[in-house]
Image (cartoon, rainbow, N blue to C red):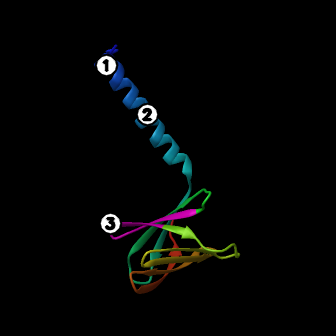
């Protein structure tokens, strides 16, 4: 036996699922910080609550997801060709072989 679900009901269900996904994604973003770097470019760091603790790093229309490394006082994150270390309002970033120094910019 096949049960037919009206199109309007299916659309409402899809909208509800999509809305929940957006809300969960926004809830995971603990903190968004902008940095200005020594090469004149900006970086946006979005610190995501864990587990595992992660960092979404955006620069030049590219986005990388980095994993938290260790538990030392300085926050260190690493991913494929990208690393990020911060102490206070300063950060050291290696982006595909280029190392730059950055400062928090509000």
Whichever of callouts 3 and 1 sits on the residue coming sooner in the sequence is: 1
Pointer 1 residue: 8
Residue 80 lies, in percent from the top left, at 43, 75
Decide whether residue 62 is among the magenta residues: yes
User: Foreground residue, 86 or 54?
Assistant: 54
Residue 19: name its quadrant.
top left
Residue 29 lies, in percent from the top left, at 54, 53
Q: Residues within 10 Å of mark 3 (few under 14, many from 20)?
A: few
Which disc, if any, is residue 61? 3
Residue 95 lies, in percent from the top left, at 41, 79
Q: How many marks?
A: 3
Q: The residue tagged with tag 1: helix, strand or loop?
A: helix
Residue 41 lies, in percent from the top left, at 38, 76
Q: The residue tagged with tag 2: helix, strand or loop?
A: helix
**Residue in the image at 52% along x and 65% along y:** 55
Pointer 2 residue: 17
Whichever of callouts 2 and 1 sits on the residue coming sooner in the sequence is: 1
Position of residue 5 relative to residue 64, above or below, is above
Q: Residues within 10 Å of mark 1 (few under 14, many from 20)?
A: few
Residue 77: name its quadrant.
bottom right
Q: The residue tagged with tag 3: helix, strand or loop?
A: loop
**Residue in the image at 33% along x and 70% along y:** 60
Magenta segment boundaries in residue numbering:
54-65
**Residue in the image at 61% along x and 57% along y:** 50
């Amino acid at each position: 036996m096949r049960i037919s679900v009206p199109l309007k009901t299916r659309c409402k269900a899809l909208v509800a699922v999509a809305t929940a996904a957006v809300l969960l994604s926004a809830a995971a973003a603990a903190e968004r910080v902008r940095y200005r770097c020594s090469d004149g470019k900006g970086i946006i760091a979005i610190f995501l609550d864990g587990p595992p603790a992660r960092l979404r790093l955006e620069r030049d229309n590219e986005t990388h997801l980095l994993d938290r490394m260790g538990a030392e006082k300085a926050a260190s994150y690493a991913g494929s060709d990208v690393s990020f270390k911060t102490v206070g309002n300063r950060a050291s970033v290696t982006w595909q072989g280029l190392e730059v120094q950055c400062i928090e910019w509000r």
